[in-house]
Image (spheres, helix red, strand yellow):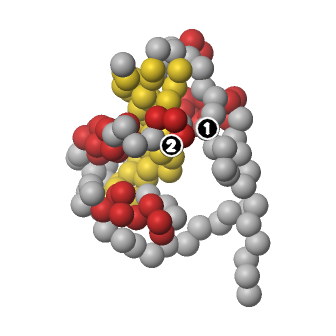
Amino acid sequence: MIKYLSNCKELENLYINGFCKDWTKPLDECAIKSIIKNSQYSILAVDNKNVVGIITALSDLINWAFIPYLEVKDDYQGKGIGTDLVQRMLNVLADMNCIDLTCDIELQPFYEKFNMLKSNGMVIRRYLSVEK
């Protein structure tokens, strides 16, 4: 049974592995734990003591929030966990007028389910080259 933990204080007692598998520059367990600890908001999906999904958000606590990280482990995808994580985070951020995130084009239909609008943006990814 999946439990959802917000701003988890017992992070050191949980197992976090199997994330960032297909990333160009994957993060290790230590880096992911630091991201969770240093984010203003985090929600974890936990099966027993195994973290199977993560979402984080940063905010100015007045008007704006940014969701930089959402990931569900491969063998838990398609079970509604990602949807639950996003909905729970949007509930936490309900008082914010502006909630932003960036994602790959193929992921946009997932976020449209939450009434999010397509937007243009710019990013720096130091591990990718810029084509001229």
Q: Quadrant of the C terminus?
A: bottom right
Whether residue 112 is situated above or below residue 13 in the rendered picture = below
Of callouts 1 and 2, the N-terminal one: 1
Residue name at image x 54 percent, y 40 percent: 74
Q: Position of residue 42 (x, y in %)?
A: 44, 34
Judging by the rendered image, the residue that carries numbered circle 1 is 19
Circle number at residue 71: 2
Element type where label 1 sits in the image: loop
Q: Position of residue 115 (x, y in %)?
A: 24, 60
Give 78 or 45, whichever is nearer the viewer. 78
Residue 56 visible in the current orientation: no
Q: CA distance from mark 1 to mark 2?
A: 7 Å
- Could you tell whether 72 is left or right of 112 in the image? right
Residue name at image x 71 percent, y 45 percent: 26
Element type where label 2 sits in the image: strand
Residue name at image x 53 percent, y 20 percent: 50
Residue name at image x 65 percent, y 66 percent: 124
Q: Position of residue 126 (x, y in %)?
A: 74, 62
Circle number at residue 70: none
Whether residue 24 is situated above or below residue 71 in the rendered picture = below
**Around disc 1, counting alpha carbons within 10 Å, would you say few (fewer than 14), some (14 to 19), or many (20 or more)?**
many
Inspect the image, locate mark 2, and give the three-letter code of the amino acid beneath it.
Answer: Glu
Question: Most extreme residue toward the bottom, as rendered?
Answer: 132
Give 32 or 39, whichever is nearer the viewer. 32
Whether residue 2 is situated above or below residue 106 in the rendered picture = above
